[in-house]
Structures are given as structure tokens and as C-alpha cells.
Amino acid sequence: MNPEARRIIELTRAARTPNADDRDRVRRALAITLAATAAAAPGVAAGATAVKAAAAGTAAKTFGALGAAGGLKLALSVAVIASVGVGAYWWTRPAPAPATVVAPMAAPAAKAVTVDPPVVEQPAAAPAEIAPDAAPPVGSMRDPLLAELSLLNRAQRAWRQGAAGKALDLAQQHAQRYPRSKLALERDAVRVFALCALGRRHQAHSLAIAIVKRAPRSPLRTSVEESCGMR
Amino acid sequence: MSDRDVVHLPNSPPAPSQPTTFEEVYEAHFGFVWRCVVSRGVPRAAVDDVVQEVFLVVHRKLATFEGRSSLRTWLWTIVRRVVRDHLRKRGNASEGEPLADDQASTWLGPAEALDQKAAVQILDTLLSRMSDTQREVFVMYEVEEMTGGEIAEALGVNENTVRTRLRAARQIFSSGTLRQRAGQIWGGHGRPDES
């Protein structure tokens, strides 16, 4: 092709090539979604839960799987979202047990953390085995970020399992413990869905409006808009 | 249309090593998936969601990927399905929709961004002059940087067919860019009768 044609293609390709921000933004959202998905997946038993911890630091550290006991398949991965300048997270592929450990990736300073908890990976049928909600004692988690995410996952799981009141309580606990959380949007989205489930539409509406205003480009927006809070 | 007769890009090795973990797939192919999603007409505001959805599928199915096709071909089929579902859900867009104005890379300076935007507009204009099959092959090869073998596999045709379609598409594109240089496409820079 002539140089002009080649240049147009190169420019177009450049325009359609993501930058580092794109890569990291999607990675963060994906990590949380995968964690939320895994937490809600059927067949997750506490004994088979491999919780991987991320430590604070400017660089990622290497961690091993801590669990996958009993020969059951690993079905839970926990993503930790770094606060500014701190932290690491990773994910795992849904590999057969024992858990495959994937090297951690350094996470850049967190910006808009997004997640779409209500629309991902809903089990097609009622899970044969509901993930027990026995909360790992928060105090036992050395990493505060992991503890926070665990609490949020429990709230999401409670909502998915129809325990909207419990989901609301857990979200409230989260709000009290982590008033400046980077995951406040996700927490409030859980609140909206739980409020809807409880028929508290007016409260859901106020919260939904606030979420959409705070994060107009978040993937959460669609789910929130589809909830009773916006209808 | 003289620079390449064979359907292999220098920077697209025909047989790249296959990543084995989800993280490796993400690292190695995020750009490819993103480009494919954008090229297939997903509006900028939805690209994050669609790319994320693609990787959720990858995460779910990677353990069952047997390597019978190239990983990129496999990814491309996932992208195509996810994008199609997304656009259907939207109900107001179709594949091949021109790039939205805000889809030029934001990390460039204004002049470069303008160049990119203009280039994208030209490309979309010229793509509209191609047949569907020519356009698909052209975008897969030139923008998404797939190899001839990957394209043939993804589309279920042989490489000769890919080559033929690509050659025709390039002729359309090359002649179009020549006319563009003469001022036919740049509305503000010339009129058709000036070429």
C-alpha cells in the first residue's frame, strides 16, 4: 500500500490501542468482579477456600495458596484493591485443584474502582451448596485490605442468597469500619440492591441517584439503573 | 499495493507461544482484545465493560482451551460473540459503526489526537466502500494485527481466500487514500472536482 494508506492504518491502530490506564482500570475492575463472582459461586466450602493475602507495599509480593484443602476445587479468589500507592492484587484462573498460584501483579494507585456485582456469573440454578457465610474473623486477617474486601464479599453473598437484611447489616458494618473505603461505590450498590429486595424503594432511590452522580461511567451504573432504585 | 504479498505481519508471529495462565493471557492480549472490541463498533463508554466481559469469559473457559486453535483466534471468537451480544442488547448500534469522536487516544497531544481522529474517519469512510467480507479481513489483518492463518481459522476459510479478500480490500483502501490526498475526502480541504 502507499505510505499514506499505511500512515492512516498506523494512526488508526494507535487510536484503538489501549494505554496503561486502560489496562490497569480494567484489571482492577476485573479483579474485584472475579473475587465477587468466586465468592458467590456454588460449591465453595469454607475448607476449600484459599484466601490469598496481599501485603501493603509499593510493589507486589509473592504469595502462595493457603488452602484448597479436602481435594475440592478452588473456587474463591480474593482480590485486594490497593489504596493509593499501596498494595497488590492478583487473580487466579479457574484451574483444577490444587490451586494454581499466579504471580502477583503490581497495582498502580487506585483510581475509580469499579465492579459490577449484580450481573456477573449468577449461578444458572440454585446452588446445591451454598457458600457458608461463616466470616473469617476480621482480626485474624493481617491485611486490612483483605479484611475489608472479605466483609464486602459477605455482604454481596448475603444479598445473592436472598438475605437482604443481612446484606444491609454487613454493608453498614463496612461503612462504619471503612468510612473512606475505595470500595464505597460497590458497598452502596449492594445497599441499593438489598433495599430493593426489602421493598424499601425510596431509600434505594436516593442511594441509586447518589451512585450514578458519583460514578457516571462506572460499570455499576447499568446495574444500579436497572434496579428498583431508578425505576 | 506493493509492499506485501504474503499475509504475515512482521510483528505478528504466526505461532506465538501460548500463555498458560489467566494473568499471562491478560498481559499478552489485553491490547489485542481492546483493539478488537473498539474496531467492532463498541462505543467508547462501553469498551471497559465489554473488554471486562471478554476476560470474564476467558477466565471461565481458559481451563478448557485445548490449544487446537491459536489463542488469538480463540480470543477473537469470544470478542465477536460478546460484542455481538452487547450491541444487540443496546439495539442501536451495529458492528462496523464508526469510531466515536472521543475514541482517539487521550494520552496524545491535541495535534496528534486530531491526526488520529482524522485517520479513523478516513479509514471508516473507506471501509464503507468494501464488501462485508473484505472489510472484515482488512480490519482483522491491518488493525487487529491478526495473521493470515489466524484469520482463515477464525472465519473458516482458507488462507488463499483471506489473501484474495485482503488484496481487494487494500486496493480499495489504497486508491481511496490517494483520492483523500487529492482532497476528495477532507471536506474542509478540497472538493471532489479538484483531484
Image (cartoon, rainbow, N blue to C red):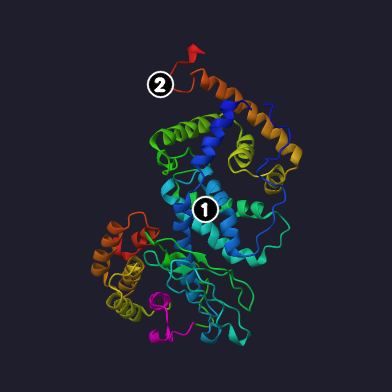
Number of on-image labels: 2
- Do tags 1 and 2 sit on the same chain? yes
Residue at the (51%, 40%) spot, across then down:
A14
**Quadrant hosting residue B7:** top right
| Majority secondary structure of magenta residues | helix
A151 in magenta: yes
For disc 1, the marked residue is: B85
Foreground: disc 1 or disc 2: 2
Marked residue nearer the N-terminal end (1 or 2) = 1
For disc 2, the marked residue is: B188
Residue at the (48%, 74%) spot, across then down:
A78
Q: Position of residue B9 (x, y in %)?
A: 67, 40
- Quarter placement of the C terminus of chain A: bottom left
**Quadrant hosting residue A1:** top right
Q: Amino acid at mark 2?
A: Gly
**Quadrant hosting residue B3:** top right
- Please report contact status of discs 1 and 2: CB closer than 8 Å, yes or no: no
* Magenta stretch, residue numbers: A131-160
Residue sitting nearer the eye, A58 or A70: A58
The crowd level at tag 2 (other Cα within 10 Å; few <14, some 14-19, many 20+) is: few
Element assignment for label 2: loop
Mark-to-mark CA distance, 1 and 2: 37 Å
From where the camera sits, is residue A231 visible?
A: no
A222 in magenta: no
Element assignment for label 1: helix
Q: Amino acid at mark 1?
A: Asp
